[in-house]
Image (spheres, grey):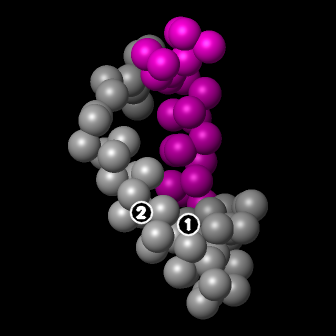
Amino acid sequence: MKIGIRKPSIKKSISARTTGRVKRAIKRKLLPGYGRKGMGWIKNPKKALYNKVYKKTTFSIFDLFK
């Protein structure tokens, strides 16, 4: 498990703001429960726990400027 600062990825940031946004919007319309709060715990609890701990133990360089 990583602790500390995360290394930013420009490629992933751009992808998340463009292609990913469109795909998520389509999935949200078609699949009931997609993107709803708490669905990660139902679908894959092990991954949801890892993500929660990771988010609490790491921070982005952009968080320093907030």
- Asked whether 42 falls inside the magenta stretch, the response is no
| In the rendered image, the vertical position of residue 11 relative to residue 44, given as above or below | above
Q: Quadrant of the C terminus?
A: top right
Residue underneath mark 2: 20
**Which disc, if any, is residue 19?**
none
Q: Quadrant of the N terminus?
A: top left
Look at the image and give the residue range highlighted in magenta: 45-66
Main SS, magenta residues: helix
| In the rendered image, the vertical position of residue 62 relative to residue 32, given as above or below | above
> Which residue sits at x=54%, y=56%?
46
Left or right of residue 43: residue 32: right
In the image, what residue type sits under mark 2?
A: Gly
Residue underneath mark 1: 44
Of residues 12 and 55, which is closer to you in this image? 12
Determine the image quadrant of residue 43.
bottom right
Left or right of residue 18: residue 65: right
